[in-house]
Amino acid sequence: MQEKPTSFSIKDWADDDRPREKLLRKGRNVLSDAELIAILIGSGSRDESAVELSKRILASVGNNLNELGKLSVKQLMKFKGIGEAKAITIAAALEMGRRRRGEEAQRTNKINGSKDAFELLQPLIGELPHEEFWIVYLNNANKVLHKEQLSKGGMTGTLVDVRLVMKHALEQGAVGCLLAHNHPSGTLRPSRSDKEITKKLQNAGTALDIKVLDHLIISQNTYYSFADEGIL
């Protein structure tokens, strides 16, 4: 259904209040998140401007763009003033941002520490609603040879095949590997099973001269590193 025109179109604002003009004059970096979203949607509702509507949408997700990116088109359309076209525009823009970060992470070809590993893997698993277990295989200079999803689970956990991990490590010619999985709940404390599978992989790797360098538990914004915590 076509959205009705309102009196809050950005083109009707004073020049100093227009996010588009502000971007042109001062650059994209000076705009707030709400102003950037206002540019995407173009107009608000009959009761509020595009910026005010954008602020309300952001407030509903704690002003967190990652959380906003998880909203579906239908969820976005629940906000008064957001029709299907505007909801699709917001969803598409945020997905492009997520992919951009992922492409930047793909250029990481050497892991110097847990932060590098997090930057590589967060775009892949940090925002998923289910748990996945990933492996990153490294050469003797800690350069990434290959990374892959080993298993995918539900909300409660996932299974890991130790033999498959070592088989793939040998195929890649790896001398080290990083383990990583996400916790959709956001809790970073390692579970008993997390510790057990890490130990099993360590033992298997020792026999084949393949070192498990770290195991990361990844959430949306941060991570837990077994190596950093001294429990590897």
Image (cartoon, rainbow, N blue to C red):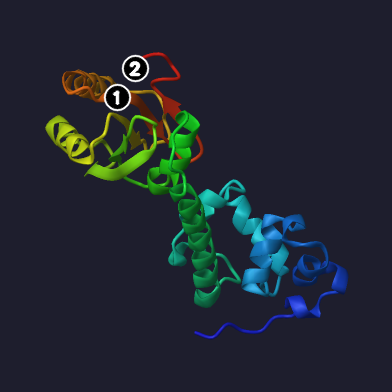
Q: Are marks 2 and 1 in contact (CB under 8 Å)?
A: yes
Query: Which comes sooner in the sequence, label 2 or label 1?
Result: 1
Q: Residue at x 48, y 61 (%)?
A: 95
Q: Which residue is mark 2?
A: 232
Viewport quadrant of the C terminus: top left
Which element type, helix, strand or loop, lies under badge 1? strand
Q: Residue at the far left: name it.
A: 163
Residue 4: image quadrant is bottom right
Q: Position of residue 184 (x, y in %)?
A: 37, 40
Q: Nearer the viewer, residue 139 or 200?
A: 139
Q: Is residue 4 above or below residue 215?
A: below
Q: Is residue 164 above or below residue 11?
A: above
The amino acid type found where label 1 is placed reads: Val
Q: Nearer the viewer, residue 153 or 9?
A: 153
Q: Nearer the viewer, residue 112 or 78?
A: 112
- Would you call the spot at circle 1 few (<14 residues within 10 Å), some (14-19), or many (20 or more)? many
Left or right of residue 30, residue 61 in this image? left
Q: Which residue is mark 1?
A: 212
